[in-house]
Image (cartoon, grey):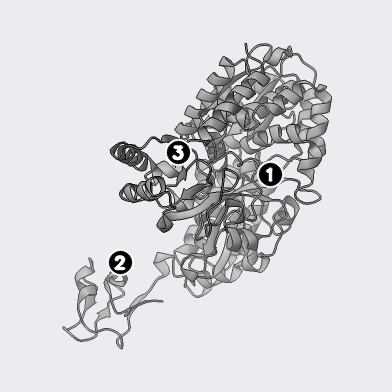
Amino acid sequence: MKTLDSLREEYTKAYRAAAGRPRVVVGMGTCGIAAGADKVMDAVKAEAAALGLNVDICFTSCIGSCYKEPTVEIALPGRAAVVYGDVTPEAVPALLAEHLVNQKPYADLVLMQIPGDGEEYPGIPAMDASTYYVKQVRTVTSRLGRINPESIGEYIATGGYEGLEKGLGMDRQAVIDEIKKSGLRGRGGAGFPTGMKWQFVHDAPGDKKYIVCNADEGDPGAFMDRSVLEGDPHSVLEGMMIAGYAIGADEGYIYCRAEYPLAIHRLTKAIGQAEELGLLGDNILDSGFSFRLHIKQGAGAFVCGEETALLASIEGRRGMPRVRPPFPAQKGLWDKPTTINNVETWANVPFIIRRGGDWYAAMGTEKSKGSKVFCLTGKINNTGLVEVPMGITVREIIFDLGGGIREGKKFKAVQTGGPSGGCIPAEFLDLPVDYESLGRVGAIMGSGGMVVMDEGTCMVNMARYFLTFTQSESCGKCTPCREGTKRMLEILERITEGKGVPADLDTLEKLAGVIKNTALCGLGQTCPNPVLSTLRYFRHEYEAHINDKRCPAKVCQPLLVYTINTEKCTGCGACARACPAAAITGAKKEPHSIDPDLCIKCGNCVQKCKFDAVELG
């Protein structure tokens, strides 16, 4: 079996040799494939063959610029690699001809260039200076979009498994102490200190202990863990192995939802590669430490993101939370001491052991160290994946990295922490993003989803949407969550239908308090957050729905009233022809009118009118 030093030398040599050849690299993460990257790849192969180009054609994962997918990277020997965005199969011939044949960047699709590979092109922003990346700190995401995620050789050539090698040469307690020194907190939601969690399992009696990776990412608008698993699977394996050595575990499980087939494929391949090279299995690197990894596919139950429900699912039982204590650190998988962390947490570990806890602790704030990966979704220009230092402000993330709100509309709020998170209004745009600051305004860090809302968002309807999700995902084991969320949802539905009464607001707040204080697990304890935060900051919208029977954002359909502005109406009849309920009448070339009793509020008239004569009230 080759040593890690010999493998590193071999793979680094091959990696550098590949960098010295012309190459075309297509981003083939799930987001890229959904945008048509597979068709772009086919077009690249066909066009390169037609032109007779001697070029390496490779694939990578998502580089984070999801709003620009599909992306293609092209590099010539001695020159910086250039990343192109919004690439279509139709654009491929011109792109390859200009960059590979004429040896000039194709200006129409240029996104950025990657410094360090060679001479830079004038006039093209470097990645670390481009608007989207200038304030990012790429640690966990450093290899995403930069290596072939199915190549263990490229992982090793870029520093992979150095953390494991270093950790195996340390005392077990020293490894835990380094994680404690780093200040790393669990990136799955609650933010519990990672080193402390490891210490509990290390100190727990018993010869058999387990390591578990929670990859059951289920928040709407969240894809941080999926992107890491698809783009850098070995980093997660390495982090779990380091923890296994530190706490005395010889076996681990990755619990990944089955809806992530590409992530599971790449994880499976990574495990096989690591086993083949002796980096996973028996007597790893001649250290005497042995470790095995298994993948357990989840069936998509959101509640299985809760650690005790997840453990039950691995064991083959129904995924339902149990009362704690005992905590998994004392009695976890098959009643053995177990350490559970999420994907992002594990991916941080190799960097911390390799570079030291002090290096990691130098980033972030006093109580929230390091960096955090966020997903930007919703009404924002630059949707995608960003990794930023803890303590950066909401404004910087949304307006500097995210490029602001679509169509020049006003920012209204951002939902952080997934469906059980809170809505942060515009007045807190300069709020630092860390565990403590978010908690003070009624939000949570969660796993890192950020859903941005503009002035056209109804906050009552938004609260209803998120509660609909959590209510349907409740396992039903405890009464507060099972019954309480159902009653809250019924009230919200009445309000959005114009049937609410003033007393509903007090009832919502009372129910939310009871559920938070008595629910069995984190799902129930946090699911009232969207309602409580919107009541706290947008109570006037609830009152408008109840007292005025009006939706200020003009979203809640039962409260909408369609009318025609007679001064703008030309009597063209387009709206009447589009109305399925025959609710619009009027003579030709004369102003028309809408019968409110017949109107079914489908909105066809608004879409068909070219004169903006149909108005919503």
Please identify the quarter of the rendering in which residue 312 is found.
top right
Q: Earlier in the sequence, mark 1 or mark 3?
A: 3
Q: Which residue is mark 3?
A: 23
User: Residue 398: image x %, image y %?
Assistant: 59, 60
In-front residue for pair 457/137: 137
- Looking at the image, tell me whether mark 2 or mark 1 is earlier in sequence order: 1
Q: Residues within 10 Å of mark 2 (few under 14, many from 20)?
A: some
Residue 319 visible? no
- Quadrant housing the N terminus: top right
Looking at this view, is 421 or 460 the one in front? 421
Give the spatial CA distance, label 2 vs label 3: 57 Å
The residue located at (75%, 36%) in the rendering is 355
Residue labelled with disc 2: 600
Dot 2 or dot 3, earlier in sequence: 3
Position in image of residue 120 (x %, y %): 55, 51
Q: Nearer the viewer, mark 2 or mark 3?
A: 3
Query: Which labelled disc corresponds to residue 518?
Result: 1
The amino acid type of the residue labelled 1 equals Thr
Q: Which residue type does callout 3 highlight?
A: Arg
